[in-house]
Image: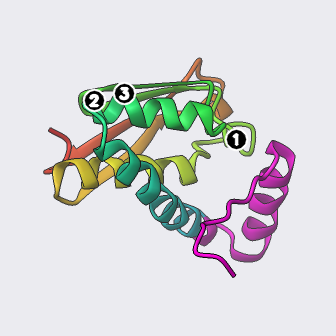
Amino acid sequence: MSGKERYLRYSEGELGDIKKLYESVMSFAAHGMFYRTGKIMGKRIAMDSKESKDFFKNAASALTQEGWAEVVEFKGTEVVVKGSIESKNGPGPSCHLLRGVITCLYEEKGGASVSCTEVECESSGAPRCLFKVNGGGSK
C-alpha cells in the first residue's frame, strides 16, 4: 500500500443512518463517541489550517468544502454554522461530530484545552447552529 492517505465519503443519509444505529445501541453515550471522533477528524483540518495566514478562515473554508456545513463563521469564542450535515438527525443539539472538530481547532490554535457546547441547533428549529467555546485555547 502506498504512503498516500485515502479518504472516505459519507452521504448525509448514510451519516444519519450511522448515527441512528449507534444511538440505538449506545443511547446518549453515542454522543460522546461522535464528539471524540470529530476531535480526531479535526486534527487534519487544524494541521492544514496552521499553514494559512488566517487559521479560522482557512478552517471554515475546509469545513464548507468538505460538506460539513453550508456556512461556518468563527467569531471569537462563538462559531455560527448554517446547514450542518448533522442538524437533521435529532430533536435537540445533534452536531456532535462538528462540536468535536470545533474543539480540536480551538485547542490546536490556542495550545490549551477548551470546552465546546452547542447552544442552538437547527435540529431544534433554530435558524442556525451556535457553538460556544470556553477555555484557554479560544483566544
Q: CA distance from mark 2 to mark 1?
A: 34 Å
Q: Residues within 10 Å of mark 1 (few under 14, many from 20)?
A: few
> Identity of the amino acid at label 3?
Lys
- Residue drawn 67% across the image and 34% down it: 123
Residue span colored magenta: 1-30
The answer to whether any part of residue 103 appears in the image is no
Which one is closest to the eye, mark 2 or mark 1? 2
Q: Secondary structure at mark 1?
A: loop
Q: Residues within 10 Å of mark 3 (few under 14, many from 20)?
A: some
Label 2–label 3 contact, CB within 8 A: yes
Look at the image and tell me in which quarter the N terminus lies.
Answer: bottom right
Q: CA distance from mark 2 to mark 3?
A: 5 Å
Residue 107: mark in rendering: none
- Residue drawn 62% across the image and 42% down it: 92
Going from N to C along the chain, the mark reached first, 3 or 1, is 3
Residue 116 x/y as whole percent: 35, 48
Q: CA distance from mark 3 to mark 1?
A: 30 Å
- Residue 62 is one of the magenta-drawn residues: no
Work out whether 118 lies above or below 110.
above
Q: Is residue 62 left or right of residue 11?
A: left
Closer-to-camera residue (69/96): 69
> Identity of the amino acid at label 2?
Asp
Residue 57: mark in rendering: 3
Q: Secondary structure at mark 3?
A: helix
Q: Residue furthest top?
A: 127
- Residue 4 is one of the magenta-drawn residues: yes
Corner quadrant of residue 4: bottom right
Q: Is residue 53 left or right of residue 49?
A: left
Residue 54: mark in rendering: 2
In the picture of the structure, the residue carrying the numbered disc 1 is: 91
Going from N to C along the chain, the mark reached first, 2 or 1, is 2
